[in-house]
Amino acid sequence: MKVAFVYPHSNIPVEPSAAISDALAVVNVELARRLAKDCEVFVYPRRAPGQPRTSSHEGVTYHRTAVWPDLLLGRLQRLEGVLWRNPRKPFRTSPFYYPFFARQVARACREQGCDVIHLHAIANFLPIFRRENPTVRLVFHAHDHAACDFDHALVESWLSHADLIFSCSRFVTRNIARRFPGLAGRCDVLHNGADLERFSPRVGGPERDPAACRLLFVGRLSPEKGVHVLLDAFREVAAAYPGARLDLVGPSDVAPKQFVDPFDEDPLFAELGKYYRSPSSYLAALKQSLPGPLRARVRFLGPVPNAQLPSLYRSADVFVFPSLWQEPFGMPLVEAMASGLPVVATRSGAFPEIVEHGTTGLLAQRGDARSLARALDKVLSDPALRRQMGAAGRTRAQQQFSWDQSAARLLAAYRRLLGGTPVSPLSGQAAA
């Protein structure tokens, strides 16, 4: 079986496991390297300057494709609101969104004789790949809310070309199935995971005094991630635990507001507009919000390569993720649980299907610093509870969130597609 993974936004180096950091690059690499044991796997990411066009690693062939023509065309996005006035049809839904990459890779997949083409995140590509590969099984993999945010008729016309529609969580899958009931039979869940060998619990050593516990956040420093709420909560925690420390790991990377709350539907974002108008101000505001005595107890560690994350998880006592956004998944939560950490997060999006409240961690209310501080206090004040939740989290990761399980589930789905009755991309019914 020949399988292609396609995603133009990830930069995957020659030694992927050593340097990747963005979530979708991790998804592509971790699934591909496991599928390569049973399939011939090709991954099509973007080509960065100085990278070879083609390389192989762990049985996977990476065909890097230049995106500079698409980036030039992407300058049209500056006319958002002029040429693209319908917020349900932004530039990202137009024919000018990465067309050169899509057509070039679609033809390459045809020349490779691929049996399955797995498109990540960009549903616009589906009709292009269908035209070039009319008999190939197309899989679309949703990693965000775009399928439910964009124009209904337009997205439905794209998704009709997919033989299988995966989403990264039940939360996203349910939303897509509700919005497109005619396609619900093609929808399924494929959770992201963690490498259980790399992300493993700390072994040995004395238990840290609760007063000196280390809290860890891993993610983008962006308003929708609620880092400002975490700092507000940490002021309360720091007063009760004089040796507590907080490490913030991740880039200062503010996502455009139209990606997280495009229609101003979430009241929690009403007061965050200033950060989206001036993205560079968010990191400065976070640092300025800390009173002098706390500045030495909060470390902004910046972006960290994926290879260095396991040691950071093992050095922490509690993982915290205070997102305001309705998160489609939350890979750091799974990595933290695999590392044996109790998790304190918010009731946002897919988080409740990852964290078992009261068993593997605690869930606080979105945007509520007091609720978050109380949850942290409950975990910090009880070493036995931390151990119990950490062990339960590790077990849950082993049972439900390992990359090995996700890859096995994906391989089984491919085999069903190739061995089952063909599905008409237009009608959604079994072909006669």
Image (cartoon, grey):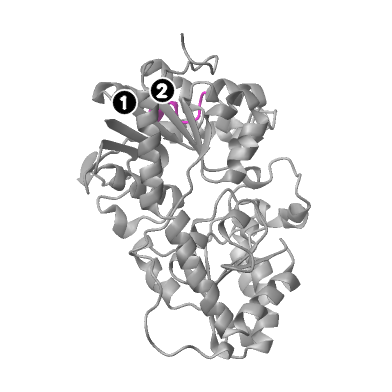
The N terminus - image quarter: top left
Q: Is residue 414 above or below residue 428?
A: below
Q: Residues within 10 Å of mark 2 (few under 14, many from 20)?
A: many
Q: Quadrant of residue 359?
A: bottom right
Give how far across and how far down residue 191 sits, in percent. 48, 48
Residue pictured at 37% horizontal, 84% vertical = 204
Give how far across and how far down residue 262 sits, in percent. 68, 41
Residue pictured at 58% horizontal, 61% vertical = 355
User: Which amino acid type is marked by label 1?
Assistant: Asp
User: Which amino acid type is marked by label 2?
Assistant: Phe
Q: Is residue 256 above or below residue 290?
A: above
Mark whose residue sits in front, 1 or 2: 1
- The residue labelled by disc 2 is 129
- The residue labelled by disc 1 is 115
Which of the marked residues, 1 or 2, is nearer the chain's N terminus?
A: 1
Q: CB atoms at circles 1 and 2 under 8 Å apart? A: no
Q: Is residue 305 above or below residue 276?
A: below
Q: Secondary structure at mark 1?
A: loop
Q: CA distance from mark 1 to mark 2?
A: 12 Å
Residue pictured at 32% horizontal, 44% vertical = 32
Q: Residues within 10 Å of mark 1 (few under 14, many from 20)?
A: many
**Residue 318 visible within the image:** no
Q: Is residue 232 above or below residue 77?
A: below
Give how far across and how far down residue 411 sits, in percent. 35, 38
Q: In the depicted view, which residue is nearer to us: 338 or 92?
A: 338
Q: In the depicted view, which residue is nearer to us: 39 or 147?
A: 39
Q: Check residue 99 for magenta coloring.
A: yes
Please report the bounds of the magenta region as a residue range.
95-102
